[in-house]
Image (cartoon, helix red, strand yellow):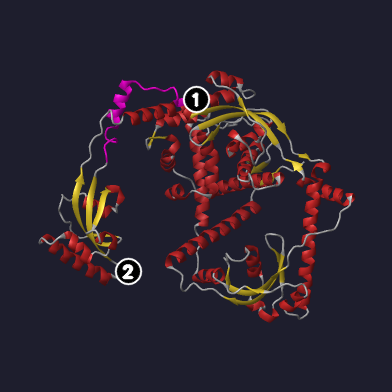
């Protein structure tokens, strides 16, 4: 199961690992608060305390996923963050009560696979100690956190992975997914509203919608930047260093061996064993003719099912070993020039392979690779120095949280500034979402330095606020024209909605949709057969139609009309005519397998959610009352 966690980490595990490992080690340090002092917990779960800083950490993580998605309820988001932490504690305690745990060897094995502690693909004990030390942690603390995280994920996967999917559920899924409907509809167009609004009406609208007429919250920041390009500018290797690097990388600088290959392919359908046997016998006969002296190119033109290469006598051109299926490449690179292989089986069928030319690799000289060596040396040296500077930036930012001066002086860097920007948009370094998120974080807004912010793998910034402008109401005079335009638009939609409602009322009284629409000069359109995914019609309209009562609940002459406003605000009146249920009979087996996996995961998540809700209801949980 640990391997499954490595391969398919998601959900709570991915979230916890991102906060606990990904952010700290990628960004060079998140402050670990260990001493709780006299702080009162926000919640207590079976004796385990949850503090406000824990909730804020989860809240900040959730907030980053909402950037650019509009307004959100801060209080609700913090409540959800607290509930998430409570849920995690309940799961861990439940696992402990049942005697479930991750063994030491499994934990060590997992830690050694983490890329943060590896050098050239292998676990680096010194890097492990150094990175833990930079976080103010010791191996015992870190292993305990990893053990907890793995236990949490394994326990929940053990619950969600017990779900199963029946054939009836598959059939019901495709019955709904592939369902088709036919309906009539008429669009009521919007007309320009010509009425006037009094100053009192405008002011009332302004007061009732004040949140829509605000200047967004903005900040301007000061920052120190370390970039890989800047670090590498002054690195100039000596001849001795370049020579040593050349000797070290000589094998990598050797050109890859290539071979000019011709082949004859007899294609095989893997689902037909008789065809496989017949093809093998036939290609063996073709091979005997080639060995007897017949021209391989003529045989390829006559027998090969690879029509493109057959026209060229089976020639595939120069190929490297990595460009082919393993079975094909293994056979091709064992042949001598001019030799014909035994029949070789691949996913395409059976091949005869002939090597017509061998491009023997040559070791490139020092002078030929000099430019590459310089770039390689500079890149490696710059990365090492970049990492060291990043560590130093972390230390300085932590030791002097109220100023950038000490860090700038220690690293001999300039303090730079940005103009104002919002949570959703900025220029320069504020164009980066990670920078904007950190700039609006609690630490920075409260006057402290940010944690180092990494952008990509080649930039890191230390930030602090220069000026903060909270969101503020725009004066009525400034937004009056926008308010009037919005009121006209809403009035236009309301009038169109009234006309649509009149059509619906007349249809309910027995008129056809066409007759009810005629006096408004509107034409009724028949949709034709429509599936759930219909590109020619409004997705909003199609969704509404598929949410309407099905044929078993009334359609055709007995169907009640409905109204839905489409993308431009125009109301559309529709009436369902017929429903054709979908089927799974002709669905491709691969698609069926994907559908089964989808339903399995969905049902597993439903069962897990229900179990977690039960734990929450029955758990020993105290939550501090809100003041």
- State which quadrant residue 475 falls in: top right
Image spot of residue 597 (x, y percent): 48, 61
Per the image, label 2 sits on a secondary structure element best described as: loop
- State which quadrant residue 270 falls in: bottom left
Q: State the residue position of label 1.
A: 389
Q: Is residue 28 above or below residue 357?
A: above
In reply to whether residue 247 is colored magenta, the answer given is yes
Image spot of residue 202 (x, y percent): 85, 50
Which segment is the magenta one?
A: 230-255
Image spot of residue 549 (x, y percent): 66, 73
Q: Residue at x 55, y 72 (%)?
A: 175
For label 2, count other residues whose C-alpha is less than 10 Å away and answer few (under 14), some (14-19) or many (20+): few
Per the image, label 1 sits on a secondary structure element best described as: helix
Report whether residue 369 is seen. Answer: yes
Image spot of residue 304 (x, y percent): 24, 64
Q: Is residue 503 left or right of residue 144?
A: right
Q: Is residue 62 left or right of residue 468?
A: left
Q: State the residue position of label 2.
A: 271
């Amino acid at each position: 199961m640990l391997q499954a966690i490595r391969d398919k980490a998601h959900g709570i595990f991915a979230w916890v690992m991102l906060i606990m490992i990904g952010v700290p080690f990628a960004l060079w340090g998140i402050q670990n608060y260990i001493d709780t002092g006299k702080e009162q917990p926000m919640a207590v779960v079976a004796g385990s305390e949850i503090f406000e800083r824990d909730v804020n950490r989860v809240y900040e993580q959730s907030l980053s996923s909402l950037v650019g998605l509009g307004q959100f309820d801060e209080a609700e988001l913090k409540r959800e963050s607290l509930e998430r932490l409570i849920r995690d504690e309940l799961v861990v305690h439940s696992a402990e009560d049942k005697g479930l745990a991750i063994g030491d060897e499994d934990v060590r094995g997992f830690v050694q696979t983490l890329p943060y502690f590896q050098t050239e693909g292998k676990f680096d004990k010194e890097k492990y100690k150094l990175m833990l030390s930079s976080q103010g942690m010791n191996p015992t603390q870190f292993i305990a956190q990893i053990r907890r995280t793995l236990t949490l994920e394994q326990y929940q996967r053990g619950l969600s992975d017990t779900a199963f999917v029946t054939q009836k559920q598959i059939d019901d899924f495709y019955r709904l997914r592939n369902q088709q409907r036919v309906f009539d509809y008429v669009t009521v167009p919007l007309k320009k509203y010509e009425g006037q609004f009094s100053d009192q009406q405008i002011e009332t609208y302004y007061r009732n919608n004040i949140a829509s007429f605000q200047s967004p919250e903005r900040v301007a920041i000061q920052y120190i930047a370390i970039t890989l390009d800047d670090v590498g500018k002054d690195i100039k290797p000596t001849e001795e260093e370049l020579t040593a690097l050349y000797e070290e990388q000589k094998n990598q600088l050797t050109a890859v061996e290539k071979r000019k290959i011709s082949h004859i392919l007899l294609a095989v359908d893997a689902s037909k064993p008789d065809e496989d046997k017949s093809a093998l016998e036939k290609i063996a006969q073709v091979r005997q003719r080639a060995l007897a002296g017949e021209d391989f190119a003529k045989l390829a033109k006559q027998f090969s099912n690879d029509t493109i290469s057959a026209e060229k006598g089976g020639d595939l051109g120069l190929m490297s070993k990595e460009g082919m299926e393993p079975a094909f490449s293994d056979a091709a690179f064992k042949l001598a020039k001019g030799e014909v292989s035994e029949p070789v089986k691949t996913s395409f069928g059976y091949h005869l392979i002939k090597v017509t030319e061998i491009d023997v690799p040559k070791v490139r000289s020092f002078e030929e690779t000099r430019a590459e060596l310089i770039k390689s040396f500079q890149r490696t040296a710059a990365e090492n120095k970049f990492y060291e500077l990043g560590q130093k930036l972390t230390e300085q930012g932590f030791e002097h949280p109220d100023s950038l001066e000490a860090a700038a002086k220690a690293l001999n860097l300039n303090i730079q500034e940005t103009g104002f920007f919002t949570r959703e948009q900025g220029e320069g370094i504020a164009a980066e979402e990670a920078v904007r998120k950190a700039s609006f974080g609690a630490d920075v807004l409260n006057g402290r330095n940010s944690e180092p912010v990494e952008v990509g793998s080649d930039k890191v910034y230390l930030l602090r606020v220069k000026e903060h402008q909270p969101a503020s109401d725009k004066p009525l005079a400034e937004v009056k024209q926008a308010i009037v335009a919005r009121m006209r638009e809403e009035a236009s939609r309301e009038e169109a909605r009234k006309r649509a409602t009149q059509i619906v009322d007349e249809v309910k009284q027995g008129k056809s949709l066409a007759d009810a629409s005629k006096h408004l000069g509107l034409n009724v359109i028949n949709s034709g057969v429509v599936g759930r995914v219909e590109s020619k019609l409004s997705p909003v309209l199609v969704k509404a139609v598929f949410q309407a009562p099905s044929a078993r609940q009334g359609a055709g002459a007995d169907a009640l009309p409905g109204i839905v406003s489409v993308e431009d605000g125009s109301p559309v009146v529709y009436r369902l005519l017929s429903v054709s249920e979908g089927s799974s009979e002709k669905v491709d087996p691969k698609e069926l397998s994907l559908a089964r996996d989808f339903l399995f995961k969905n049902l597993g998540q439903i069962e897990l959610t229900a179990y977690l809700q039960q734990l929450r209801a029955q758990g020993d949980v105290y939550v501090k009352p809100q003041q």
